[in-house]
Image (cartoon, rainbow, N blue to C red):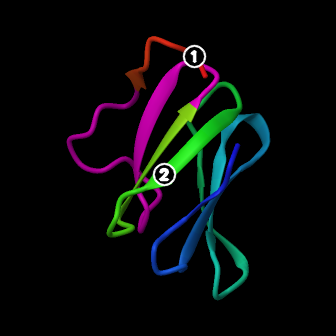
Amino acid sequence: MSGALTADGALAAVAAEGGSVQLWDVAAGRPAHVLAGHTAAAAQAVFSPDGALLATCSADCSLRVWDARTGAPPPGAPRALQCGQCV
């Protein structure tokens, strides 16, 4: 997976074991959240322009959206969307 960084450089997203994605607090140099849900390796990640949301897609053909502050799906968001075409 290519990594992703918020525009302000505060958070970084990187692939981790078992399909999870780690959100790193760059200033502290430690993981802030582990985002679990994909069942295969995460392939892409992108932050929203304001850094509030993170979208990840995986080789399991799912797209997930996360609240970058809490590490949880945002309220009302579907658990996962099937992208129809695996990466």
Give residue 87's position: percent from left, percent from top: 61, 22
| Three-letter residue code for mark 2 | Val
Classify 43 as above or below 32.
above
- From the top left corner, tell me how far across and down residue 43 is, in percent: 65, 36
Q: Residue at x 23, y 48 (%)?
A: 75
Mark 1 belongs to which amino acid? Cys
Residue marked by disc 2: 46
Quarter of the figure with the N terminus: top right
Going 75% across and 35% down the picture, which residue do you hit? 18
Residue 37 is inside the magenta segment: no
Q: Are there few (<14), some (14-19), or many (20+) residues within 10 Å of tag 1?
A: few
Disc 1, SS: loop
Mark 2 neighbour density, 10 Å: few (under 14) some (14–19) many (20 or more): some
Residue at screen point 64% across, 80% down: 26
Residue drawn at the location 30% of the way across and 50% of the way down? 74
Using the image, determine if residue 28 lies above or below residue 33. Answer: below
Mark 1, residue position: 86
Q: Which residue is most to the bottom?
A: 27
On screen, 70 above or below 42?
A: below
Q: Magenta segment range?
A: 58-80
Q: Are marks 1 and 2 in contact (CB under 8 Å)?
A: no
6 to the left or right of 15: left
- In percent of width and height, residue 48 lies at 36, 58
User: Which picture quadrant has residue 38?
Assistant: top right
Q: Tell me where residue 83 appears, x and y as whole percent.
A: 43, 19
Q: Is residue 77 magenta?
A: yes
Residue 20 lies left or right of residue 55; in this view the side is: right
Mark with earlier residue (1, 2)? 2
